[in-house]
Image (cartoon, coloured by chain):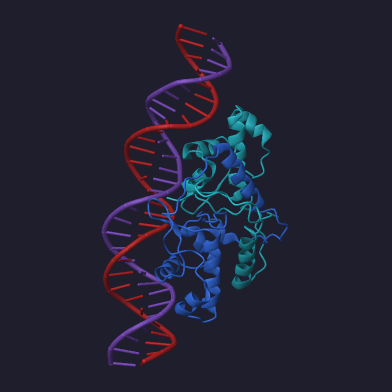
Chain colours: A cyan, B blue, C purple, D red
Amino acid sequence: MSDMNRRSMPLFSIGIVKSLTALTARQIRYYEDNGLIFPARTEGNQRLFSFNDVDRLLEIKELIDKGINLAGIKQMLPTREKPAAETLETPIEPEISDKALRQMLRQELMDTGRLGKASLRQGELSRFFH
Amino acid sequence: MSDMNRRSMPLFSIGIVKSLTALTARQIRYYEDNGLIFPARTEGNQRLFSFNDVDRLLEIKELIDKGINLAGIKQMLPTREKPAAETLETPIEPEISDKALRQMLRQELMDTGRLGKASLRQGELSRFFH
DNA sequence: AACACATGTTAGCTTAGTTAACATGAATTT
DNA sequence: AAATTCATGTTAACTAAGCTAACATGTGTT
């Protein structure tokens, strides 16, 4: 019953995640090697991160900054993402039209950005634009 | 006064956008060639799409499905993204600590997924996992 | 029949991401 | 103090993903 939603959808390449977190690729991969994070993979084996993953990396970063080592962080951050499994439990999914799926997805995306939070000031996110 | 927010942040590679929209890369590039969409670019010239861009592509897709041609679509969809410019109007940005920026960004990301919408059922999004 | 439109396909090239190995400075252990 | 471990940097060799440009094609238009 994988509760799939937009927070766990693998969307971001490692390059984007580097920008979003200000971590190096080396760090991100190392955290994965050490079981702190479990990004999905593309067919070609490239990492694909979800919002949850990015969020988790930011938490890791904060704890690192506080001087906590990876073992400690691993304790503190409960494994929200399962390290392995599923792949097997794939019940026959009910069909849905592509159009309906598009509509749902579009709605999801629309929601993502509706909240009236103060927008980041110009210049501060310049690292995201090359 | 670019009102920069998470909806206009360039985050997605064309591969992801293909999955999200069920358009082909050829189609997406063609729509760009014809002035319907203006994705950002990485340093290395690869396209990077924002939520706004994805949303716009879904709108384009719907209109295409209705038999409207690109010229018509171009009329109907107001150019929300400016085809060029800015780059010049870059006032000296006030400083902000990296940590504060992280915190803000993290908050933005946290919000993205807070709404209690029904989650998509398993299997329907399987194309997003390879 | 000729043309335009929207998309497919292919080729050649560049950018981005992969693992694995070795390097290193700061802590920790022996 | 020497050896070890931790977290990260750097590099090399390779693969995947993305780029533009060119040519192909089916459908619709003039």
The reply to whether residue A84 is in sight is no
Q: Position of residue B15 (x, y in %)?
A: 47, 59
Callout count: 0
Q: Image quadrant for the N terminus of chain A?
A: bottom right
Q: Residue at x 57, y 49 (%)?
A: A120
Task: Please identify the quarter of the rendering in which residue B58 is found.
Answer: bottom right
Q: Is residue B97 left or right of residue D27?
A: right
Q: Residue at x 59, y 71 (%)?
A: A98
Q: Position of residue B29 (x, y in %)?
A: 42, 66
Q: Is residue A61 above or below residue A14?
A: above
The reply to whether residue B29 is in sight is yes
Q: Is residue B94 left or right of residue B25?
A: right
Q: Is residue A104 above or below residue A52?
A: below
Q: Is residue B108 left or right of residue B81?
A: right
Name the foreground residue: B86 vs A99: B86
Q: Position of residue A109 (x, y in %)?
A: 61, 61
Q: Is residue D8 above or below residue D5?
A: below
Q: Is residue A10 above or below residue A79?
A: below
Q: Position of residue A78 (x, y in %)?
A: 68, 38
Task: Please identify the quarter of the rendering in which residue C28 is found.
Answer: top right
Name the foreground residue: A1 vs A27: A27
